[in-house]
């Protein structure tokens, strides 16, 4: 029962993690943050679900070590240094 309550409450670490949020926040905290910022476009960027999406997009766009190695090898073959 305690686990169910924590998992459905986004103000807990567990609830935020299960919701896919970047950080835990209650509804009151989200409203306060939004009101404090004032600009809805700016406030939207710092909402926990938006920040988590941005983090996922950043992670997804990172090249793998294999891709880095392949690109380095291609550059090594193509770049010719003149003496």
Image: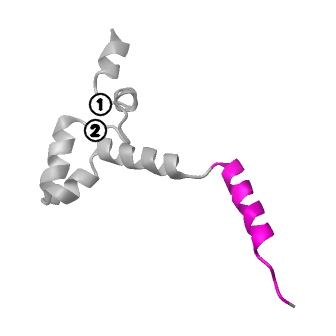
Give me the C-alpha separation between circle 1 and circle 2: 6 Å
- Using a 10 Å C-alpha cutoff, classify the residue at mark 1 as few (fewer than 14 neighbours), some (14 to 19) or many (20 or more): many
Residue 76 versus residue 27 in the image, above or below: below
Outermost residue, front direction?
78
Residue at the far bottom: name it. Answer: 83
* Viewer-proximal residue among 23 and 65: 65
Residue 9 appears in which quarter of the rendering?
top left
Q: Is residue 37 above or below residue 59?
A: below
Magenta span contains residue 65: yes
Give the residue number, with chain letter if any, for mark 2: 25
Q: Quadrant of residue 42?
A: bottom left
Instruction: Return the residue nearer the eye: 73 or 3.
Output: 73
Residue 77 to residue 57: above or below: below
Label 2 packing within 10 angstroms: few (<14), some (14-19), many (20+): many
Q: Which residues are magenta?
A: 64-82
**In percent of the image, x 37 and y 15: which residue is there?**
3
Q: How many marks?
A: 2
Residue 39 in the image, given as x and y percentages of width and height: 14, 60
Q: Do residues under tags 1 and 2 come within 8 Å of each other at their CB atoms? A: yes
Q: On the rendered image, what quadrant is the N terminus found in? A: top left
Residue projecting furthest to the right: 83
x, y percent for residue 78: 76, 71
- Circle nearer the N terminus (1, 2): 1
Q: Tell me the SS state at disc 2.
A: loop
Residue 5: where, in percent of width, then height?
A: 30, 17
Image quadrant where one finds the C terminus: bottom right
- Magenta highlight: main SS: helix
Q: Residue at x 35, y 37 (%)?
A: 21
Residue linked to disc 1? 10
Q: Residue at x 16, y 51 (%)?
A: 34
Q: Relative to 81, is 65 above or below?
A: above
């Amino acid at each position: 029962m305690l686990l169910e309550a924590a998992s459905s409450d986004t103000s807990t670490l567990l609830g935020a993690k299960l919701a896919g949020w970047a950080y835990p926040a209650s509804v009151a905290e989200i409203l306060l943050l939004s009101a404090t910022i004032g600009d809805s476009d700016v406030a939207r960027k710092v909402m926990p679900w938006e920040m988590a999406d941005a983090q996922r997009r950043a992670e997804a766009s990172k090249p793998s070590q294999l891709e880095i190695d392949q690109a380095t090898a291609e550059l090594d073959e193509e770049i010719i240094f003149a003496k």
